[in-house]
Image (spheres, rainbow, N blue to C red):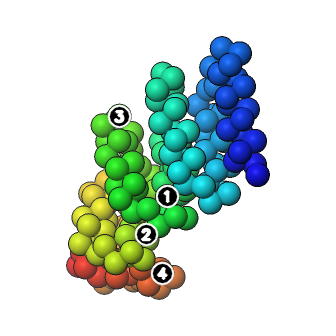
Amino acid sequence: GQCDQVVSLLEEMDARSLVPGTNTYNLAIAACEKAGQWEKALSLLEAMGARGGAPSAATYAVAVSACERGSQWEKMLALLDEMAARGLKPTLATYAAVVETMGKCKQFVDGALVFQEARAAGHFGSLYATKGDLDLAGCSSGFACVVLQHT
């Protein structure tokens, strides 16, 4: 599939001493994410770092998305930790994917901690109506369960 083709292309680039840039890795990781191959997506992220590449917040967002498809909540938490260690700020979508997966996997306590971290970073304010009431309309049940643990 497309993921395997992209991995082969990166290997060919390496054999020719060509260094793929961040955008190239982002596209490669995204191809593996779309193919549902979270393991390959994470190995590409690891290879990027090993080759001296600098993953961006977008790189991690795609890797988190790949893990979401595989319900790999532990890996998602590790990716959030890596982002923090690199000084990268997760986007709203990245946090939402992690919280959603934590809810689906019934990891409500850890999910609530991630939700709390996201709120401290200024995300998810729109869930709270003007009077401070919680509005979960449109949220998935997994996401809602995590949020309710937090409140």
Whether pointer 1 and pointer 2 mark residues with C-beta atoms closer than 8 Å, the reply is yes
Which marked residue is nearer to the observer: mark 1 or mark 4?
A: 1
- Mark 2 closeness class: few <14, some 14–19, many ≥20 residues within 10 Å: many
Element type at marker 1?
helix
User: Residue 111 location, x and y as percent?
Assistant: 31, 68
User: Residue 120 location, x and y as percent?
Assistant: 26, 57
Element type at marker 3?
loop
Amino acid at the residue labelled 3: Arg
* Mark 1 lies on residue: 67
- At x 47% / y 67%, what residue is drawn? 71
User: Residue 79 location, x and y as percent?
Assistant: 39, 48
**1 or 2: tag closer to the N-terminus:** 1
**3 or 1: tag closer to the N-terminus:** 1
Q: CA distance from mark 1 to mark 2?
A: 9 Å
* Mark 3 lies on residue: 86
Q: Look at the image and tell me in which quarter the C terminus lies.
A: bottom left
Amino acid at the residue labelled 2: Thr
- At x 76% / y 52%, what residue is drawn? 1
* Mark 4 lies on residue: 140
**4 or 2: tag closer to the N-terminus:** 2
Amino acid at the residue labelled 4: Ser
Horizontally, residue 75 falls left or right of residue 20, namely left
* Mark 2 lies on residue: 101
- Residue 18 falls in image quadrant: top right
User: Residue 115 location, x and y as percent?
Assistant: 31, 65
**3 or 4: tag closer to the N-terminus:** 3
109, above or below 138, in the image: above
The reply to whether residue 2 is visible in this rendering is yes
In this view, the residue in front, 146 or 19, is 19
Whether pointer 3 and pointer 4 mark residues with C-beta atoms closer than 8 Å, the reply is no
Q: CA distance from mark 3 to mark 1?
A: 19 Å
25, above or below 129, in the image: above
